[in-house]
């Protein structure tokens, strides 16, 4: 009896040893790996990457910012997107720093936001409404309202500035000769010659034949391609087109796209556009530059007044999906470089 008990104990010992030495199955290993990755992402999300005075912002805040402002990059839209480069992520982080800096200052003021503003802003977003972080939306509206009320409010462009720009950039407003161009595009030479033969005796049928025979996108419009400025067409086509008289039809012209038959109905000579015609365009150019400089000045002032700490070593954006990632993970910066990289 004693021998049987000893034997049973030995057997149980062997079983227990084997049980503890058992290797994990592939399913167990995959599940453990998945859990570890999820835990690592959660921990990384909590890491602080930006401090503005006493206010702290984490990787999760950066992620929320990207999902709202750049959904194609963050992939929150569910659509496949190319892997972002390290340089792109750096630029996006600069935008995040600037955004939070403006928000920090804006939060010192009472900036009301009503339901209409919220719905209008949400309606313009290219993201699913179910995935929208309302706090981020409110922040974005607050930043925009503060900038327009306190930074951009007094900016304008005078008539004198518009005229000065016009006189200094006359060549930008000098138009080359233009033609109003029509075409019939055929896929083979035999068809092109047949259509050209019909037009010999019936040139008025050009638009009709374009709609019926042409394989080009503008066939439905009777072959109307619009105005083309000298120097914008392929050289072999341009030589033919600009040598035509109005309402005359070209011979068949072969290209990589097929066989073309051209007609022009209007010619415009080279000319200098009048100031009145280009005034809105000049005003947009000058206003854009003034807004950019005002934004830069605002950020430079903020950088002097605020204590801004940027922790690049804790910045996380799924490193495995970043192309060319050569980030120095031991780098910690207490600076305002991200504010100086403003684009307005």
Image (cartoon, rainbow, N blue to C red):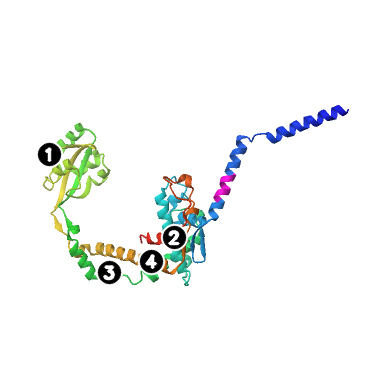
Closer to the chain start, of discs 2 and 4, is 2
Closer to the chain start, of discs 1 and 4, is 1
Pointer 1 residue: 201
Q: Position of residue 251 (x, y in %)?
A: 14, 38
Pointer 4 residue: 300
The residue under the point 22% across, 42% down is: 210
Pointer 3 residue: 157
Mark 2 or 1: the one toward you: 2
In the structure shown, which secondary structural element does the residue marked by tag 2 occupy?
A: helix
Q: CA separation, marks 1 and 3?
A: 57 Å
Q: Position of residue 306 (x, y in %)?
A: 45, 67
> Quarter of the image containing the N terminus?
top right
Q: Position of residue 81 (x, y in %)?
A: 43, 46
Bounds of the magenta segment = 35-41
Mark 1 or 4: the one toward you: 4
Q: Residue furthest right?
A: 1
Q: CA separation, marks 1 and 4?
A: 72 Å
The answer to whether marks 2 and 4 mark residues whose Cβ atoms lie closer than 8 Å is: no
Q: Was residue 291 drawn as part of the magenta stretch in this picture?
A: no
Q: CA separation, marks 2 and 4?
A: 13 Å
Q: In the rendered view, tell whether residue 172 sits above or below residue 252.
A: below
Can residue 120 be spotted in the picture? no
Q: In the rendered view, tell whether residue 67 sits above or below residue 198.
A: below
Pointer 2 residue: 97
Q: CA separation, marks 2 and 1?
A: 70 Å
Q: In the rendered view, tell whether residue 107 sits above or below residue 211.
A: below
Q: CA separation, marks 4 and 3?
A: 23 Å
In the figure, is residue 313 to the left or right of 25? left
């Amino acid at each position: 009896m004693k021998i049987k008990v000893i034997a049973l104990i030995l057997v149980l010992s062997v079983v227990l040893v084997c049980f503890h030495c058992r290797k994990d199955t592939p399913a167990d290993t995959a599940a453990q790996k998945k859990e570890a990755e999820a835990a690592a992402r959660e921990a990384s999300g909590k890491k602080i990457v930006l401090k503005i005075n006493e206010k702290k912002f984490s990787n999760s805040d950066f992620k929320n910012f990207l999902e709202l402002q750049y959904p194609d990059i963050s992939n929150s839209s569910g659509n496949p997107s190319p892997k972002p480069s390290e340089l792109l992520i750096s630029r996006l982080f600069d935008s995040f720093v600037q955004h939070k800096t403006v928000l920090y200052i804006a939060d010192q003021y009472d900036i009301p936001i009503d339901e209409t503003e919220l719905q209008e802003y949400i309606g313009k977003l290219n993201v699913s409404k179910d995935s929208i972080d309302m706090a981020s939306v409110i922040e974005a509206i607050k930043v925009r309202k503060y900038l327009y009320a306190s930074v951009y409010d007094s900016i304008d462009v005078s008539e004198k500035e518009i005229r000065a720009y016009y006189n200094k950039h006359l060549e930008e407003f000098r138009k080359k000769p233009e033609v109003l161009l029509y075409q019939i595009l055929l896929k083979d030479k035999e068809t092109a010659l047949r259509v050209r033969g019909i037009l010999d005796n019936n040139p008025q049928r050009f638009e009709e034949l374009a709609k019926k025979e042409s394989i080009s996108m503008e066939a439905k419009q009777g072959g109307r391609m619009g105005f083309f400025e000298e120097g914008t067409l392929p050289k072999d086509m341009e030589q033919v087109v600009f040598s035509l008289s109005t309402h005359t039809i070209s011979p068949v012209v072969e290209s990589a796209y097929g066989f073309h038959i051209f007609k022009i109905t209007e010619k415009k000579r080279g000319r200098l556009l009048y100031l009145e015609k280009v005034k809105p365009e000049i005003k947009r150019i000058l206003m854009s530059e003034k807004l950019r400089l005002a934004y830069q000045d605002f950020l430079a002032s903020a950088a002097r007044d605020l204590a801004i700490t940027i922790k690049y070593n804790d910045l996380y954006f799924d490193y495995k999906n970043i192309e060319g990632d050569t980030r120095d993970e031991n780098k910690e910066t207490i600076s305002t470089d991200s504010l100086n990289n403003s684009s307005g």
